């Protein structure tokens, strides 16, 4: 199993989790994003960490109460000289020169879309 596949397995299991914290920072001359997710005492906390971010979009529905993520998807974007998949429109031309990227999307009261070269999932141990 590749690192991206391992990340995808954890990330897609996060449906129903609440976003506790979004933390955007600069680490070693690159953008980094940590998304802390919490379910409650029944399930472990999860942090999804992204580095070398190529695209980031967040949104929130007006007057939406805090609620769980309804849908989480991940897509591996191999280096190719072809258009980005439908629904992804970064200000960057896709090419074979780019590294393999992961596209993470989450929807619910908060919508997130992240494309990055490095994605790591941290699961709380109990």
Image: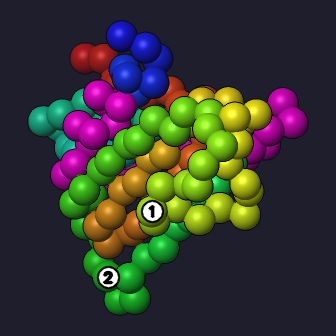
Tell me the quarter of the picture where residue 7 sits. top left
The verdict on residue 26 being magenta is yes
Q: Position of residue 53 (x, y in %)?
A: 67, 44
Q: Which of 51 and 54 lies nearest the eye of the viewer?
A: 54
Please, what secondary structure does the residue beneath circle 2 have?
A: loop
User: In this orientation, does residue 28 appear?
Assistant: yes
* Mark 2 or mark 1, earlier in chain: 2
User: In this orientation, does residue 22 appear?
Assistant: no
Tell me the quadrant of the picture where the C terminus can be found. top left
| Residue linked to disc 1 | 86
Return the mark for residue 113.
none
Identify the residue at horizontal 72%, vertical 63% (top origin).
Answer: 91
Proximity of marks 2 and 1: CB atoms separated by less than 8 Å = no
Q: Position of residue 43 (x, y in %)?
A: 18, 34
Please, what secondary structure does the residue beneath circle 1 have?
A: loop
Q: Position of residue 71 (x, y in %)?
A: 25, 56
Number of residues whose C-alpha sits closer than 10 Å to that of mark 2, classed few (under 14), some (14–19) or many (20 or more): few
Q: Is residue 72 above or below residue 13?
A: below
| Residue linked to disc 2 | 64
Number of residues whose C-alpha sits closer than 10 Å to that of mark 1, classed few (under 14), some (14–19) or many (20 or more): few
Identify the residue at horizontal 48%, vertical 73% (top origin).
Answer: 59
Identify the residue at horizontal 36%, vertical 10% (top origin).
Answer: 1
Q: Position of residue 5 (x, y in %)?
A: 37, 23
- Name the outermost residue toward the front: 81
**Segment tinted magenta in the rendering:** 8-35
* Mark 2–mark 1 distance (CA, rounded to whole Å): 26 Å
Q: Nearer the viewer, mark 2 or mark 1?
A: 1
Tell me the quarter of the picture where residue 55 sits. bottom right
Q: Which of 113 and 31 lies nearest the eye of the viewer?
A: 113
């Amino acid at each position: 199993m590749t690192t991206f596949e391992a990340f995808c397995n954890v990330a897609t299991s996060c449906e129903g989790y609440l976003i506790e914290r979004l933390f955007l920072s600069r680490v070693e001359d690159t953008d980094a994003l940590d998304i802390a997710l919490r379910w409650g005492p029944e399930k472990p906390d999860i942090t999804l960490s992204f580095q070398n971010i190529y695209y980031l979009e967040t949104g929130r529905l007006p007057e939406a109460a805090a609620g769980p993520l309804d849908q989480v998807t991940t897509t591996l974007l191999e280096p190719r000289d072809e258009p980005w998949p439908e629904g992804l429109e970064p200000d960057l031309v896709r090419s074979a020169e780019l590294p393999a990227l992961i596209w993470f999307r989450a929807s619910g009261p908060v919508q997130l879309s992240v494309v990055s070269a490095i994605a790591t999932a941290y699961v709380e141990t109990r």
